Amino acid sequence: MAFLRSLAPAILFVAVYFVISLLVTNSYYQLMMTLVLVWTVMGLSWNMLSGYTGLMSFGHAAFFGLGAYFSVLGHVHFGLSPWLAIPLAGALGAVAGLVVGIPTFRLRGHYFALSMLAYPLALLYVFEWLGYQEVSVPMERDHQLLYMQFEDQRIYTWLALALAFAVIVITRMVERSRFGMALLAIKQNEAAAEAAGIDTTRWKLRAMMLSAGIAGAVGAFYTVVLLVVTPQAVFGVLVSAQALTVAMFGGVGTVWGPVIGSLILIPLSETLHAEIGSWLPGIQGVIYGLAIVVVILVAPEGIFWKARDFVLKHRERAETARAVSRRAPAAAAPLPATAAPARRAPEGKPILEVRGLSKAFGGLKAVQNVTFSVKEGQILGIIGPNGAGKTTLFNLLCGFVRPDSGEVLLDGVNMAGKPPHVMCAAGLGRTFQVMRPFARMSVADNVVVGAYVHAATDAEARARAGQAIERVGLAAIQDKIAGNLTTKELRLMELARALAGRPRILLLDETLAGLGPAEVGEVMAVIRSLAEEGATIVIIEHTMKAMVQLVDHFLVLDHGEMLVEGEPESVTRDPRVVEAYLGAKWSAAHA
Amino acid sequence: MTAAILIENILQALVAGLLIGAIYGLMCVGLALIFGIMRVINFAQGDFMMAGMYCAFFIFGPFGISALFGNVVGPYVAAILAGPVLFVAGYLVHLFLVSRVSGTNTATLEGEGHYAQLILTLGLALILTNGAMILFGSQPFSVRSPLAISAWEIGPLWGDRVSVFVNKSRTVSALISVATIAALGWLVARSRLGKALRASADNPTAAIYMGIDVDRSHRIAFGLGIAITAIAGGLLATNYSFHPYVGLEYVIVMYAGVVLGGMGSIMGAFWGGMTIGLIQQMSTLVLPTQLQNTAIFVIFLVIVFFRPQGFLGRSAERT
């Protein structure tokens, strides 16, 4: 029901567009109405990959062109009807997306964008070489319906409208599901997404296939409308640029961006092209170029977001006055901190066993032959001076870094070298020393991303996220955007995100770093309450004082090696530990 | 007999590859200079090169270089003079546009700053290409020197059959390329300006604290990079005709060369461009001419997949 309501604007848009199309009689404007929708769909296709995952594609023309040539050649050689060719072109596009995606997703940032550019350009030359400089769709006067060749231009508009509506619905569905959450998380912070249990490669591939499938289908439809296909027209840079431009101009990462972008840019450039294109032949490209430059400088995320921020700001200003009194009592009051840390001693069987773990970066032996185990319910503290290899050890455990040798046994199964999302699914939840929030998402959404690992449904994930937020005491601010939180709130949010996945072991990497003394107390209270509930925790920390109160067992690292291991009492008195922390001189003087 | 022809073809392709490779190398150096110092990938580099070609054309004709230096030397002088003109253009484009999305302005943008740069320069590329279309139309231009149709014959090398023809114009162009790179190398390695550029590249924040105007360094680097590629364009124009869309044909050549040489390595980019030139010319031995560019794209993809840090460079991509 909520989903249907979210489609209301889309249905309204389709209805209005339909009514307008009924009124337009000029065939040129009818064609333009169709083209607006074609580029809307193409923009949505680009948006599906690049808008949501943040991986810029300059090569969507590859899929568009393949769809177009598939449709026209299928018709010429096999009499294939567009009714069949369009869905088949979609499937072909999806396959092409998979073929392109598997190798290309190994690249990031600039390299990804540039590589994507190479595909359509390579195909362009191949199709020219094959002799398909210009392929026309054969006229089928006897089978007009079968071959989508209508006298009434408006029918094309309606078909395009149906296609656009379908793609809008698909995009909406993706946006609201764990699919969309995963893509947004990848866009904002890929490492954190992996640590939250998201198989980033798989989701990116799915996004690519869906995106490329849409591009292939709309490419096939394009041939039905224009009746002529040339390599430049379907594989050219302008096709990729146009898809990107309408989405960027209208708004990245929202279903309405491409719609707004096409509604403004396509009529503008087509009209200019028709009016003055005869003596200014490149005017269309210049318009797109200018639109891109202006948008990047003025509203880098597009008109939709600019307008939304404007509206939200006004609404917020009106609301803050009312909300002040209401919000005050709900302010951060986490779980009641029980006075005595009378926790049962951990006696369970070991969950995590690490044997002989080593990693060297070139000549630097970051972690050498580290062996320890963590029992159920135990709180293990890992300490050591800066550069001792603590974070590297965590990265080895979580799969961000592959160990050179050694084993990481989770419930007796060796998981060493498995990717982070697998480790997360197996029960390792972590926080980061340098915080990695999904900065543009709300606190609740941040935590939901972490909850999807073991949740079967969206509702279950929401419920688990809600519990985790409650547990760390952030319920009052769960609708805030993560980018606006304080350091303490971010630390707690990361903790909630890790908790939401119901990890068997929680790895906390310097959770207290950057906090003031009072804030340390608040966060410690949360961690202590988790410990009392029987959670198993491995914690890296600098502040000895905080650690001594909390942990059952210490592991001291220095220069990547295990220095000492044991009870807090004995470890803090060990001369080697004192020496590692304070230097040989100090320990000699105070011996 | 057939063996002789094969050897002759291979040698011929090798020579052609080396000569064109020197010009490609120069092109790539321009792009690498911008990337190396500013960490900005200039998508519009090919179109600035196109602008350099038209610039050389107008310097040669209407501005009287042909009258002053004659038809033989004139085209090369025009090519070199296109450099300073495009330097000013690049300097201004950076000042008014690129600086808004790069350098000290992107500190708050994090990863998104990179995309803003790529997309801004994509917009510039569209404006330049289509603007040139409006101004000059689609008919091909050229600044061909009479040397372009004469060659030195080396040989016969083996018996009386195998001999290699070395195009005079391309040889002159290749020599000018190498000289330009040598001059640039001196500028970057020895001069005060070069030190400022390298410091800005290495650690912009530290450079600012040392009193270096990093934004100015970036403007100069952008202008220089554009100028270098424009000279390469002018040199190409002495051999080939060109049109407004020519930038696109070379943009992948440039990226491939720069990636091959290791992103950010300026000398590496020269050797990368040289390698691409050789691959392109050698590919004509086995592939139809239309697929030359496809061969480059395939090589480019292969390089990027297997060795994104290039053969000479270290990984420059920030994660």
Image (cartoon, coloured by chain):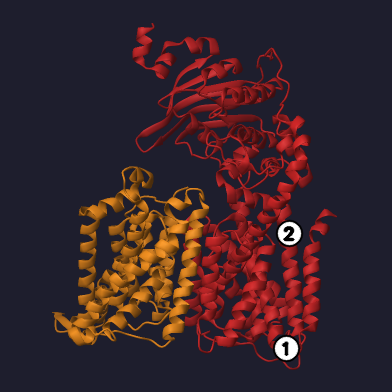
Answer with left or right where residue A384 lies relative to residue A34: left
State which chain disc 1 sits on: A
Which quadrant of the figure contains the N terminus of chain A?
A: bottom right
Crowding around mark 2 (Cα neighbors within 10 Å: few <14, some 14 to 19, many 20+) is: some
**Which residue corresponds to the image point at 71% horizontal and 88% vertical from the top-left?**
A27
Residue B305, horizontal then vertical, whole percent: 45, 57
Give SS at disc 1. loop
Residue B116, horizontal then vertical, whole percent: 51, 59
Q: Residue furthest top?
A: A591
* Rendering colour (chain A): red
Residue A383 visible in the shown view: yes
**Which residue corresponds to the image point at 45% horizontal and 82% vertical from the top-left?**
B133
Relative height, residue A157 to residue A261 (above, below): below
Residue A10, horizontal then vertical, whole percent: 77, 65
Q: Which residue is mark 1?
A: A26
Q: Which residue is mark 2?
A: A172
**Letter of the orange chain:** B
Residue A89 visible in the shown view: no
Quarter location, residue A60: bottom right
State which chain disc 2 sits on: A
Foreground disc of the pair 2, 1 = 1
Q: Amino acid at mark 2?
A: Arg
Q: Residue furthest bottom?
A: A141
**Which residue corresponds to the image point at 31% horizontal and 83% vertical from the top-left?**
B58
